[in-house]
Image: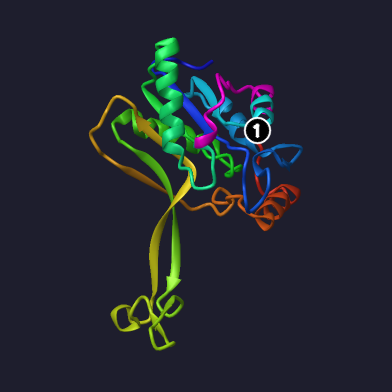
Amino acid sequence: MKTKKYEIVAIIPARGGSKGLPRKNILNLGGIPLVAWSIRACLASSLITRVLVSTEDDEIAEIAKKFGAEVPFLRPEGMSIDDSTVTPAISHLLSTLNETENYAPDFHVILYPTSPFRKVETIDALIRKAIEGYHPVSTVKAVHISSWELHSPTEDGFLKPIISPLATGGDTVRYIRGSGYLSVSNVKSAVPKPYHHILKDKIEQIDIDEAKDLALAELVLNEGLFKREY
């Protein structure tokens, strides 16, 4: 049974359009639509108290409801074009719910539907970090690149290294990039105290954007490399 010391809402932004992989949010993966993986992960969490899907698409809305999420209303079409960010859509969702239901959660958890292989223990552990006072809590990936790998063109048609091999001694440089796996914000706090969790499990890091990513995810399931908890 879930405790309700805090109101913790999960928001899954899932628009209908996608250039790289058309209609990817509802493509089949392991017998269920891709968006359903995120919904089920949220429902399996011991801390999340409400699961919402933000979409402008009727079909996605119906699928989301079928798998146990709420879609209180469709988001405006203008918030779902190719270059849209999710921030206006999330703000619109929360502000409308505040106006219509007087709903004011303590924390909101954002999960992109393109990351299907989430561990419930990871979700709950990161929410607990937010409850401890960290804000925002987010997941990132470590990217290791040799100092010889990346180049930029010069005006005379040559290539020059972006990272100087002299500065690094030719060693591999580690960068950190964001991940759509999960982020948690304290809605009622504006005091920054960020916490970044580096995803180390290659399976958890899988993000579906192109056909090859979906094929990789299917291979993971076929080989039993992800333990389905939900």
Under mark 1, the amino acid is: Ala
Residue 166 is inside the magenta segment: no
Query: Which residue is rendered at x = 51% and y = 36% of the image?
Result: 78
Question: Which residue corresponds to the image point at 44% horizontal and 19% vertical from the top-left?
Answer: 96
| Picture layout, residue 213 above or below residue 36 | below
List x then y, in percent, for residue 112: 53, 40
Identify the residue under disc 1: 36
Name the foreground residue: 124 vs 148.
148
Up the image or down, 83 lies above or below 48; here it is: below
User: Quick one: SS at disc 1?
Assistant: helix
Q: Position of residue 179 (x, y in %)?
A: 47, 48
Question: Is 45 on the left or on the right of 58, as rendered?
Answer: left
Question: For residue 95, what is the image quadrant?
Answer: top left
Which quadrant would the N terminus be assigned to in this image?
Answer: top right
* Side of 22 where 186 appears, left or right: left
Placement of 25 over or under 176, stated as above or below: above
Which of these two is toward me, 43 or 23? Answer: 23
**Residue 26 located left or right of residue 148:** right
- Residue situated in front as seen by the camera: 102 or 204: 102
Where is residue 149? Give x, y as percent: 46, 77
Left or right, 102 with reference to 76? left
Magenta residues span 63-78
- Residue depicted at x 42% and y 23%: 94
Quadrant containing the C terminus in the rendered view: top right
How would you classify the magenta stretch by its main secondary structure?
A: loop
